[in-house]
Image (spheres, rainbow, N blue to C red):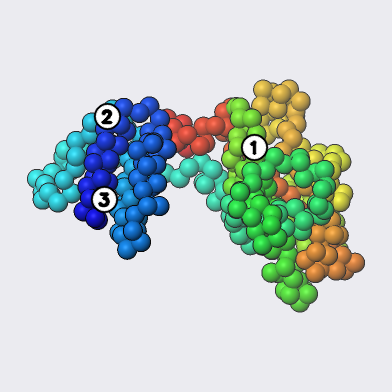
């Protein structure tokens, strides 16, 4: 009996593979009547043959699934014999590109992040990278964005289908502030012993943006957070002035105007004096003499409270700056998408 069934499967298998070769949508083979009737057979065969028949059928289905996934229909590839002896006569001379003296180098973004971290190290800041996947709590709730808060929509976040323990989707962070709560919690004990919390957080962030020369779905940010006693807006502006002056290698002036972020109060949008024309107006600053560069403000008391820090005793400031944008201004790059392309002509200029 089982021999007959085996033969039946083998015959159908041959037919199915012939059919597969002619199908435009290869997946249709899994819905074919031939395969279906093999499954129907299952209902009528004797119980003691069901297991072995089922296994054969399953193997066939797996084989078909795999074959239907191959997207190279019509291309006859030379089979590779993985058991063949290696050809030891290959010489490096056959691959001149490997012998050239050209060396790889750091992506400009990496190099500039290193430079920024060095600047902050001299100012006493520690650094920690932000994660590339996070949860709703770190991205929103811990940062004073209550459930249903309209500002949650200001960031067009990418979500996963997978849910966390609170049944919320995971998030590809849209800003490096997603690390703020963690840093505040982990440094709280030191803060209470008298050591201010001083961190910079570089990281890759993701936004569901329409991509153009100025906007990219993936870019880099540098977050900064400082919390201690008697910290004011003056301290914030002083640190940012030092950062920009060191980064651009000249004295930079700052200009702030009120803005709104849920996690800072007051919040500001900050512009720097154009490092190229010293406020006279040029193409980089759109003739205005100033370049809007970042969002910042004093850490909202609710954010401190969420992390178990008493806002009646401690205050602090935070900012987030787009690193791609900084590098673009510094080197006069007009196309943000260059950074992600791996285009050597672009990268070799650095
Ligand atoms: Zn200018």
Q: Residue at x 34, y 54 (%)?
A: 45
Q: Are marks 3 and 1 in contact (CB under 8 Å)?
A: no
Can you tell which mark lies on residue 75?
2
Q: Residue at x 69, y 57 (%)?
A: 167
Residue 299 x/y as whole percent: 81, 56
Mark 3 to mark 1: distance in Å?
Answer: 54 Å
Asked if residue 142 is positioned above or below residue 89 in the image, the reply reads below
Q: Nearer the viewer, residue 62 or 237?
A: 62
Label 3: few (<14), some or many (≥20) within 10 Å?
some
Can you tell which mark lies on residue 5?
3
State the residue lying farthest toward the bottom. Answer: 193
- N-terminal-most mark, 3 or 1: 3
Label 1: few (<14), some or many (≥20) within 10 Å?
few
Residue annotated with mark 1: 208
Residue 297 left/right relative to 186: right
Q: Secondary structure at mark 1?
A: loop
Q: Residue at x 60, y 34 (%)?
A: 216
Asked if residue 129 is positioned above or below residue 158 in the image, the reply reads below
């Amino acid at each position: 009996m089982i021999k007959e069934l085996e033969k039946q499967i083998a015959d159908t298998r041959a037919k199915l593979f012939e059919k597969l070769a002619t199908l435009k949508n290869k997946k249709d083979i899994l819905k074919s009547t031939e395969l279906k009737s093999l499954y129907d057979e299952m209902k009528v065969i004797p119980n003691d043959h069901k297991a072995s028949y089922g296994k054969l059928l399953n193997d066939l289905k797996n084989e078909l699934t795999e074959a239907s996934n191959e997207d190279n229909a019509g291309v006859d590839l030379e089979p590779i014999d993985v058991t063949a002896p290696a050809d030891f006569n290959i010489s490096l001379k056959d691959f001149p590109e490997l012998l050239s003296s050209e060396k790889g180098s750091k992506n400009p973004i990496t190099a500039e992040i290193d430079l920024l971290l060095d600047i902050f190290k001299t100012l006493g800041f520690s650094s920690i990278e932000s994660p590339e996947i996070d949860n709703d709590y770190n991205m929103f709730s811990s940062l004073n964005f209550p459930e249903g808060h309209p500002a949650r929509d200001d960031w067009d976040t990418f979500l996963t289908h997978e849910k966390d323990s609170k049944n919320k989707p995971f998030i590809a962070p849209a800003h490096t502030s997603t690390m703020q709560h963690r840093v505040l919690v982990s440094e709280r004990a030191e803060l209470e012993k008298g050591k201010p919390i001083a961190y910079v957080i570089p990281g890759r962030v993701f936004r569901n943006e329409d991509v153009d020369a100025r906007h990219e779905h993936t870019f880099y940010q540098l977050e900064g957070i400082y919390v201690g006693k008697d910290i004011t807006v003056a301290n914030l502006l002083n640190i940012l002035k030092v950062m920009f002056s060191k980064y651009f290698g000249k004295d930079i002036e700052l200009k702030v105007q009120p803005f709104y972020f849920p996690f800072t109060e007051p919040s500001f949008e900050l512009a720097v004096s154009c490092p190229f024309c010293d406020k006279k107006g040029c193409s980089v600053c759109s003739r205005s003499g100033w370049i809007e560069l970042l969002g910042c403000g004093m850490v909202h008391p609710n954010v401190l409270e969420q992390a178990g820090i008493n806002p009646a005793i401690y205050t602090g400031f935070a900012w987030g700056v787009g690193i791609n944008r900084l590098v673009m201004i510094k080197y006069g790059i007009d196309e943000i998408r260059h950074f992600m392309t791996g285009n050597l002509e672009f990268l070799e200029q650095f």
